Image (tube, coloured by chain):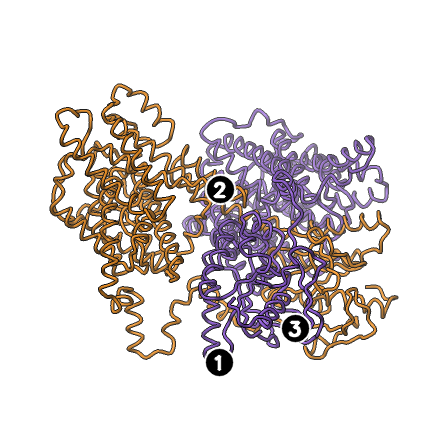
Chain colours: A purple, B orange
Amino acid sequence: MGLSSNRVEDLSGHACNDSFELPISNNEPLEVHRVCLPPHKTTLQKLRQRLLEVFFPDDPLHKFKNQTCLTKFLLGLQFFFPVFEWGPQYNLKLLRADIISGFTIASLAIPQGISYAKLANLPPIVGLYSSFVPPLIYSVLGSSRHLAVGPVSIASLVMGTMLSEVVSYTEEPLLYLQLAFTATLFAGLFQASLGFFRLGFIIDFLSKATLVGFMAGAAVIVSMQQLKGLLGMIHFTSKMQIIPVLSSVFQHKDEWSWQTIVMGVCFLAFLLTTRQISTRNPKFFWLSAASPLASVILSTLIVALLKSKAHGIQTIGHLSKGLNPPSMNMLYLSGPYLPLAIKTGIVSGILALTEGIAVGRTFAALKNYQVDGNKEMMAIGLMNMAGCCSSCYVTTGSFSRSAVNYNAGAQTVVSNIIMATAVLITLLFLMPLFYYTPIVILATIIITAVIGLIDFQAAFRLWKVDKLDFMACICSFFGVLFISVPLGLAIAVGVSVFKILLHVTRPNTGVLGNIPGTQVYQNLHRYRTAVRIPSFLILAVEAPIYFANSTYLQERVLRWIREEEERIVANKETEIKCVIIDMTAVSSIDSSGIDTICELRRTLDKRSLKLVLANPGGNVMEKLHESDALESFGLNGIYLTVSEAVADISSFWKKEPELPI
Amino acid sequence: MGLSSNRVEDLSGHACNDSFELPISNNEPLEVHRVCLPPHKTTLQKLRQRLLEVFFPDDPLHKFKNQTCLTKFLLGLQFFFPVFEWGPQYNLKLLRADIISGFTIASLAIPQGISYAKLANLPPIVGLYSSFVPPLIYSVLGSSRHLAVGPVSIASLVMGTMLSEVVSYTEEPLLYLQLAFTATLFAGLFQASLGFFRLGFIIDFLSKATLVGFMAGAAVIVSMQQLKGLLGMIHFTSKMQIIPVLSSVFQHKDEWSWQTIVMGVCFLAFLLTTRQISTRNPKFFWLSAASPLASVILSTLIVALLKSKAHGIQTIGHLSKGLNPPSMNMLYLSGPYLPLAIKTGIVSGILALTEGIAVGRTFAALKNYQVDGNKEMMAIGLMNMAGCCSSCYVTTGSFSRSAVNYNAGAQTVVSNIIMATAVLITLLFLMPLFYYTPIVILATIIITAVIGLIDFQAAFRLWKVDKLDFMACICSFFGVLFISVPLGLAIAVGVSVFKILLHVTRPNTGVLGNIPGTQVYQNLHRYRTAVRIPSFLILAVEAPIYFANSTYLQERVLRWIREEEERIVANKETEIKCVIIDMTAVSSIDSSGIDTICELRRTLDKRSLKLVLANPGGNVMEKLHESDALESFGLNGIYLTVSEAVADISSFWKKEPELPI
């Protein structure tokens, strides 16, 4: 219809109309630029690019480009075994730092290992085994320099909860142990395959909001479970929810042992105080690092000295000396409990992974190096697969020990080797020393560790920043507390995904106006200085147009038009002749979206309104082109910017005021 | 650091530096505009707005604003009973058109009603009952003028499949009938409550792509089932999948009746030919509309005349005269099959709803009126709830009959009343005429109807426009064909949702360049004329930043920087000093996203790179403000447009070349 159609042919052939009066203040000649299609690609090329972007967004092989074969081999070796990367530069200065940090985390790892094994309802010694083999394997494969590897509270708790809901660890200890090792195998397999198939992004779906709620819920559950040790009780429910636990505690009031309670409360106060001091002043990190071992030594001494008078205090008792026994023959690979082992493995595996990756990334960011998520997953997975054959249960990078490791000045994963050596010495020579260690002390260590998982500040921040995130957090907290650990987690992930879908289903739309003196169009509601352009209604759609929102968007656009028309009638302004949709934020469109745009155009045509698109993205242009919708719009219906659309269409109206649109 | 900080205080106080040389060609004075926060709102206001947008996007009550009580009452009456809206304007001319179209759809509805009831494994008469009560109720409540209400193939098929997989309709016909009515009740309840709670957007998740595949799969399954009638077989499998059906057909080869086959093939050819003619030339719509009734009459006559010689042809047999008997007492509201009835009701209900709403919207768009989805859901739901008490099974707006209705010139829902009257006459007086109607003719009618559901063109278009949509289509087709109807549907919805999540997890990013002579920045890859600005790396992020993509985006931005630095080293260009992220398409951000932005900023700071955001949306600004990240950026880190950011930062560098960033 004469609308400067020369821009269709050639980008440089501008349609200049000097006489045109722009609605904006400057008097430049009107230039109309062509909207380009992205360079043509075959389906195969597109698929390849898409797959690369999904699975190799970090382009892990970029180092290998343009290298000789030898360099490629060396780089490959470094790629799969990061030890070859830092190994050659390792020196005595680094070793000294690593020895100090290694022994520091060992002093924390030994009591925590024993305690966490109890949390998973496993024999205490399994916790020590798990602090020996996995750190050694990680030190060869892992790419984080500060991760302290071993059992962690969340994974221990989940494993303990899920297994003991079906199999009693007191009545069938061997089966329980077999299932624990098998779950570890599946956790490792799952973790390694996530890494191998580069599906690491799956753990991103456990959002921080979800984890804050989940950890807090788990911490409460774990602390409740420790009431057994803290009160010195013998009979206790195998359930995890808050109500059965509390009723169990008060049903067996007669079992409460005052000696245990006194000791527990004292040491709990001691541990919490040192923790508080370390949190307030990071210089005193060693205080919280050393206090668990100090508590164990002190309480063991007390019990050993008072052994005749402290009958009420339960102790760990005999622990056999010696290295990790092989446990390959204990794997439970067929039978009715296999699905349980698989499910437990996957849930505890994904949680272990989330903690390990998050911790690794946190400290990498502090020291400005990169941790490759997928490689870490393979490392953690392989370490667990090796662990399940050597009497270890699920391990990963622990947040608390890694923080101590970092603060103690660890430089490389050698600190893990030092820690493993310390555990080795313990396993070989020091096991009899734990004979008199009271169980209540393990309970206090666990409580101190898990209380740190309750992050009120993070929850408050979620509330402040994003109410829906806060809801996901609360859902996962109460889900874990009152339903069950895996179901609570599933609910929380569901809420997070629902949040995404809600945003896609009900995207933002708004009316834009021109900011005087510029070619910028912004939301009228937000920018009070922005002004409406008479005869135009300029709408912004702020989401991809998909099947899930196409109906909504169509109705919403029609509502905006209706409201604008009502406003115009009320204020006696010029009526709308053209609707411009700013597609800048429409990053993608599917076939339903295209149908919607075309139908909207037809509907508006019937009402003598012109529909014009401004700045459709590359994807959108491509789809419009492929569906032949582009032709029906004509390039006169698509502009590069809103301001060009406004200028060009107004100039056309000026030139041919009689013509209908 | 001196970067025109006056813009922080006042929007109108521009920082003008005439001496500045813009990287773009014109010589306007440099103006830097402030990025506004959206107007402040309390949490409650935000929640209210959000809820209104989710549940009342169409602002259904806008008509009621500023009206007197009486008008409000009348509008309310019209709102709930659309009959009051068109009733007063109804006249003889409209009635004449409705009578013609009413009788036309009746001639189609009667044979289809009987056939679809057979498809649902119900007595044929239930199909006629279902074509009588529901249309009457819809004509009072419904807001579409062209919808022809009655049983439809998809809902009948789904009900037949799901119920007969558990309960045999030959062995326990009463229980089967009870379950069908109960499923209808739950379908109605589900539909009405979706409408009542304004959750209509749930059906949007059945994307067109999914439905194309689903319908094609269902059509194949239904056609296979009709082999029983078409071959005149007596024994047939109760399974629905393609393989058991085919094996059943060939196992009982001895049951094939040549008379039935000859008759079936002839009438199938006749029906398909008339359908083809009508499709090619919409003027002859009456041909396909009248041919089913013609076939029924003709075949009944043939069988009646040849009754002594055509023993092999099974006929409908005796049908009792009379109106819909009440069926309230047949509802199966407790017992082991209740979950089955509920599941069947929900699945068939949602499919019926999808068809009804889509058909209503299609014809409303053609005649340029609006159909309120939520109100339609309530109408269809109430109609089914009434139906289940009067011996009807699931009904909705049928696509084929509505098209005939539209083509026959229907003006209002009165055509449904006319159709119901015709069905009433049939029920009262004409039932004995169906005694000799051969069952094979019902099979041919069903096949003709469902073959139209296979839409090759739509599938081809999906392939052309969106490969992932095509995959959803194929998944739902094969899912229905080889697994089961509800599972196939679930898989297809899963694929559609996965598509959304994939886009969120791996959003597009790209490097922008300036289009010479403008202030426009576009993707360098797409616009070959766009040029890089030395010292700047301008990145566009084309999706909301969420927990699900924040890790990816961080890594991807760092990779863009690395690649740009490599390119710069190779070409010996000026090194990057500033990274600008164009946030125009970032329509939303959550707490993980904010953390990512802040962490990215810290990481780049350590590498002496400045990070600047351009044009963050209202939501994003609000979140940045609430999380105090805005302060850490300072307003010097956030610009209204990329071009202002480039101009302002370059001018700052020119003025103070010595200062580090």
In front: label 2 or label 1: 1
Image spot of residue B179 (x, y percent): 25, 42
Q: CA distance from mark 2 to mark 1?
A: 49 Å
Residues behind callouts 2 and 1 on a single chain: no
* Amino acid type at mark 3: Phe
Chain to which mark 2 belongs: B
Q: Is residue B627 visible?
A: no
Spot occupied by residue A356 in the image (x, y as percentages of width and height): 64, 45
Q: Residue furthest top?
A: B254
**Quarter of the figure with the N terminus of chain A:** bottom right
According to the image, label 3 marks what residue?
A20
Q: Which residue is mark 2?
A: B472
Distance from Cα at disc 3 to Cα at disc 2: 50 Å
Task: Say which residue appears at 23% left-offset and 42% top-offset.
Answer: B293
Q: CA distance from mark 1 to mark 3?
A: 27 Å
Residue shown at the point (20%, 51%) measured from the top left: B132
Disc 3 chain ID: A
Residue B610 relative to residue A435: left or right: right
Provide the secondary structure element on which disc 3 rests.
loop
Q: Amino acid at mark 2?
A: Ala
Q: Which mark is residue A571?
A: 1
